[in-house]
Amino acid sequence: MATRKLRLGVLASGGGTNLQSIIDNCQEQKIDAEIVLVLCNNPDARALERAEKADLPHLCINHRDFSDRQSFDQAVVAALREADVELVVLAGFMRIISEVFLEAFPQRIINIHPALLPAFPGLHVQRKALEYGARFSGCTVHLVDNGIDTGPIILQAVVPIFADDDEASLSARILEQEHIIYSQAIQLFAEDRIQIVGRQVKISGAKATDETLVNPTF
Ligand code: GAR
C-alpha cells in the first residue's frame, strides 16, 4: 500500500537550492512528502526553473503587483489552498508573512534560517556572524510566527567558523547543512512527530545529542 504523502507548498525567492534538495528527497522517496506547488514572488527566481525542470506545479505571484502585504498574502493563501497544501515550507522566501497568512496555516508554516537563532535574525546573517567574531554558526528550522525569525525552533545544525572564512565560504558550509536538516524537519511533520507546547517544540522519539564542541582548538 502506498504511503500517504504530506502535501508541501514550497515558497522561494531566489536560487532555490533548498527547494532542489527537497525535490530530490521527495523523488528519491527519502521523505514521505510531495511538492504540490512551488510559488515564487520573483519572476526571475531560479527556483521556478527548478520546478519546471522537475515537472512540478509552479506559479509566480509577483509581490510588486499588490498594493500591500495583506493582499499579496491573500493571493498566496488562495493558491496554497487551491493546491490543498498541508505544510508551507519557506525556502529562501524573502517576504515577511502577515497575519492573513499565519491565520490560514496555523503552526503549519516553517522556515529555514542561516544562523543559530536566536542569534543573528534578519538578513546578511553569515556576514554578521563573521563580523561579530562568533566561533560557530549554523542553521535553524523553525515555525513561523509574527516576529522576524522568532518562532519555535524545530532543528538546528552547527558548523564551525574558521579564521580564513569569508561570507561565501561560511554560507556554503551552512547551506550544506540546510539541505540536510530541512528535509529531516519535513519528515518529522510527515510522521506527525511534532508537538508545539508554548515556544517549545517536542519531537516524539527524539533525544538530545551529547556531543560538545569547542572551537578553536589550541
Ligand atoms: C538560504 O541560506 C536560506 O537559509 C536563506 O536564504 C538562502 C536561500 O538559498 N533564508 C533566509 O535568509 C530567510 N530569512 P536557496 O534559495 O539556495 O535555498
Image (cartoon, rainbow, N blue to C red):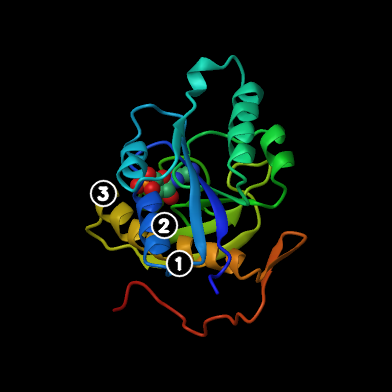
Please tell me how crowded label 2 is: few (under 14), some (14-19), or many (20+) other residues with Cα within 10 Å.
Answer: many
* Marking on residue 157: 1
Looking at the image, is 90 positioned above or below residue 201? Answer: above
The disc, 2 or 1, on the residue closer to the chain's N-terminal end is 2
Please tell me how crowded label 1 is: few (under 14), some (14-19), or many (20+) other residues with Cα within 10 Å.
Answer: some
- What residue appears at the point 72 percent right and 59 percent down from the top-left corner? 199
Mark 1 CB within 8 Å of ligand 1: no
Instruction: For marks 3 and 2, give the one nearer the viewer.
Output: 2
Three-letter residue code for mark 2: Ile
Q: Secondary structure at mark 1?
A: strand
Mark 3 lies on residue = 168
Residue sticking out furthest to the left: 164
Residue sticking out furthest to the bottom: 210
Quadrant location, the N terminus: bottom right
3 and 2 marks in contact (CB < 8 Å): no
Mark 3 CB within 8 Å of ligand 1: no
The disc, 1 or 3, on the residue closer to the chain's N-terminal end is 1
Task: Let me know if residue 118 appears in the view.
Answer: no
Mark 2 lies on residue = 22
- Percent across and percent down for residue 46 are 31, 37
Q: Residue 24 versus residue 16: which sits nearer the camera?
A: 24
The disc, 3 or 2, on the residue closer to the chain's N-terminal end is 2
Q: Secondary structure at mark 3?
A: helix
Instruction: For marks 2 and 1, give the one nearer the viewer.
Output: 2
- What residue appears at the point 56 percent right and 54 percent down from the top-left corner? 7
Three-letter residue code for mark 1: Ala
In which quarter of the view is residue 160 placed? bottom left
> How many angstroms separate mark 3 from mark 2 (CA)?
22 Å
Quadrant location, the C terminus: bottom left
Three-letter residue code for mark 3: Ala
> How many angstroms separate mark 1 from mark 3 (CA)?
18 Å
Looking at the image, is 208 positioned above or below residue 75? Answer: below
